[in-house]
Amino acid sequence: MKRFAQLFTELDQTTKTGEKVSALVRYFEEAHPDDQLWAVALLSHRRPKRTVSTALLAQWAAEQARIPIWLFEESYHVVGDLAETLALVLPSPTHSADQSLRDWIDFIRALEPLAIEEKKIRVQDAWMMLAGTERFLFNKLITGAFRVGVSQQLVVKALAHHFQLEPSYLAHRLMGHWSPDTTTLEQLVQTDDTHADRSKPYPFYLAYPLEQDPASLGDPADWQAERKWDGIRGQVIVRHRQLFVWSRGEELVTDKYPEYRVLIDLLPDGTVLDGEILPFKDEKPLGFQSLQQRIGRKNVTPKIRSEVPVVFMAYDVLEHEGVDWRARALWERRERLEKLCGIASSVLHLSPLVPFASWAVLAEERLRSRTFLSEGIMLKRKNSGYRDGRKRGDWWKWKIDPFTVDAVMVYAVRGHGRRANLYTDYTFAVWHQGQLLPFTKAYSGLTDDEIAEVDRWIKNHTVEKFGPVRSVKPELVFEIAFDGIQKSTRHKSGIALRFPRIHRWRKDKPAAEADVLETLNRLLEEK
Amino acid sequence: MFLDPWKPVKRALITHGHSDHAHAGHERYLCTDVAAPVIRHRLNLTDQVQTVAYGERLQINQVIFSFHPAGHIPGSAQVRVEHQGQVWVFTGDYKLEHDGLSTPFEPLRCHTLITESTFGLPVYQWQTQSDIFADINRWWRSNRSQGKTSVLAAYALGKAQRILVNVDHSLGPVWVHGAIDTVQRVLAAQGLRLPHTRLVTAQSTRTDWEGGLILCPPSALGSPWIKKFQPYSLAIASGWMSLRGTRRRRGADRGFALSDHADWCQLNEAVRASGASRVFVTHGYTEVFARWLQERGVEAYEARTQFDVEAET
Ligand SMILES: [Zn+2]
Ligand SMILES: [Zn+2]
């Protein structure tokens, strides 16, 4: 466990991807193979099943620390992380242990059939053997909440370096169903060329935000415009009568979207399409939030499928008849794409073009984005090839400006985790019939310095405290940006905002000059 | 007669020179002789400051005042007040562990104790000073071997000098930011002996501090000043660093939970050792710590302070 704790600390202490990868590479060179396999499993989100409830753990730790449970809970609120709170309140260990990561996972799994009293004795004993990061990690494992700030891509990169293998091949090997109980690390990464090649995606080409005047792009006739859809970028691959669906970030998500199975029959062998995995119902997109609900589910049940069905909104063809088409011009690929998507299907949609004769016309179209439930306009140069990564010049995203409203801060709540000691979550109000009516919460958007300043202000201008919430003097005005607005019966204000965030602190504006509810209601009507 | 007041008063008793305790604008100041130079310097005072030695008794009307070591920073004091046989002790900021720099905390018996509670939660339990300095030295050594400069942020008054006297000077030279240098000049002038440091100036260059340790105040974090040390590893020394969330939020590479305040165990120990039957809790987790004491049979109250700022100074 010590070596794994060291890896965790190293990953935790740096934000530089290069340093993360070298920490992983060193780990794979030094750790015991049994542990390595479990480390890979944990880093690719395979956790041991939870065998003790968190409520019991809190109770046992409080008992061992000789503190009442309310004090444990107060502490938890400040720390914002259960595993960390458990680790910190407990007294120092009385003896030391040399168990490996694997041993501790076996230990946790062996608890399952035991009676509660027996579990308690073992867990409390384990706590007295572990200190610092090891104790914290043990708690993360036993609470089933192990996470570390390293993406799958970096794990793949490090393993690829360690085993001298292709990253995209390894990415694929780590997906799907495997368990550390039934395989070894060697077996897991063992070469199986034909299979790997079959599933291999192309790197995605990404667009830059358009900040300049579109007229600077030259002749409108050189450009193709589409709506910018708000789903997840994806690649659909049909090769050897097999379907693979990749999402951006090299994640194989074929099993998550069973709707796409029909694509095997719709698309000829040797086809790779770039597009958007888009939640879509009753002939219109559902919005990203509903897709997030679906992604959050472990199992794709028929219920969630009928609530949030997805289509594939095709943007481009990257491979046709087994040949890489990326170097061909966009207009040529588009012609081919239109043919491939010509078959009527409820799942495969062709991303429609937005015709425009001048930039002024396109600017008008952009303003209509919200009626299409899209985020703006995509601009692609007609004679460009499909490049990789984020290379400037051929693809631009021209997003719509968010809505904004000036609102008064009325409540504040302490943050969790990263911001355990600061008031970071605020509730805002607008004027309605001479009173301030709370209508939304909003997070982020402020710099760390501003957060600290607001925090100090809150602590000195508290009107009342109720538990973790403080009501504050209604003085500070913030500009709140949001992407959409809906009627809501759950809120007293009658409205709900989509993705509200703090745009800026209006130090120049007194509370009396904040917006009124009618302004928001008008936005609702405009829709 | 007021203790660490922030609104202007006629006569202020000041426990130590940290800015949340020593405010400007009072008519007269009373503090220990060791704390006085910094307080004079920071608040621009001259003869308004009256000083006493630790333990010296001062009678004003029927009340006897005395200042006793709090172990927080050099010159920091608890204030003992005795009136008609009743003893009150106001701890100010304090810690029980000896830091090798400040006069160690003196336990005082009293009827009523007013204690701070900056770290009044059971999640705050400090490692021993020697363990923390072993970590700091290890970090410095590892940076040195990677060709990085070690930049350590710590409060200019107290924390920086505590680091200075405890860190392993065989590892390399120690350089300081101007704000720390200023404090240390005042301390040196009053006769406090500190290990040798060098001041980072506009003229100093990379080769000067190669392999060295740079001490700077937390306010230097994120300023352009710090960029000149590239490549560097940045660490912060503060009790708040014991929480992972705070460590990450501050954007430092490392956080060392080195505090000049009492941790959970020390707060409880201080309350117990005072023998006080009544306790007022200020500065920090007042509500929680008071309730905890009440449940343990101590008559405890949350004392209202004008500021509820969670700064560790
Ligand atoms: Zn202080
Ligand atoms: Zn203080």
Image (spheres, rainbow, N blue to C red):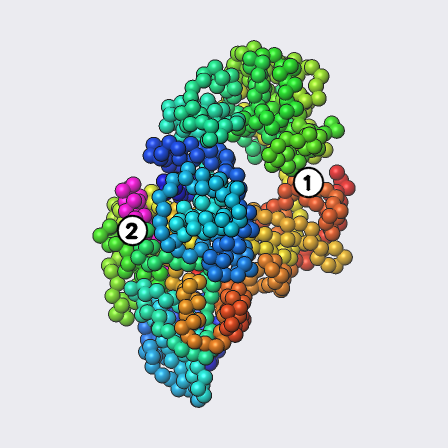
The residue lying at 22 percent from left, 52 percent from top is B170
Q: Amino acid at mark 1?
A: Gly
Residue A406 at x, y = what percent? 65, 51
Tell me, yes or no, if residue B221 can be seen here: no
Q: Which corner quadrant of the image does residue B182 belong to?
A: bottom left
State if disc 2 and disc 1 touch (CB < 8 Å): no
Disc 1 packing (10 Å; few <14; some 14–19; many ≥20): some
Q: What is the number of the mark on residue B137?
A: 2
Give the percent coordinates (x, y) of residue A384.
54, 19
Can you tell which quarter of the image residue B109 is in?
bottom left
Residue A277 visible to an observer of this rendering: yes
> Does B261 sit above or below residue A44?
below
Q: Which residue is mark 1?
A: A484
Q: CA distance from mark 1 to mark 2?
A: 53 Å
User: Which type of secondary structure does the marked residue at label 1 adopt?
Assistant: strand
Q: Is the C terminus of chain B in the top left, top right, bottom left or bottom right quadrant?
A: bottom left
Q: Please state which of residues A432 and B118 is positioned toward the viewer in this rendering.
A: B118
- Of the residues tagged 1 and 2, which is closer to the observer? 2
Residue pictured at 64% horizontal, 53% vertical: A427
Q: Which residues are magenta?
A: B136-155
Rendering coords of residue A405 (x, y %): 67, 48
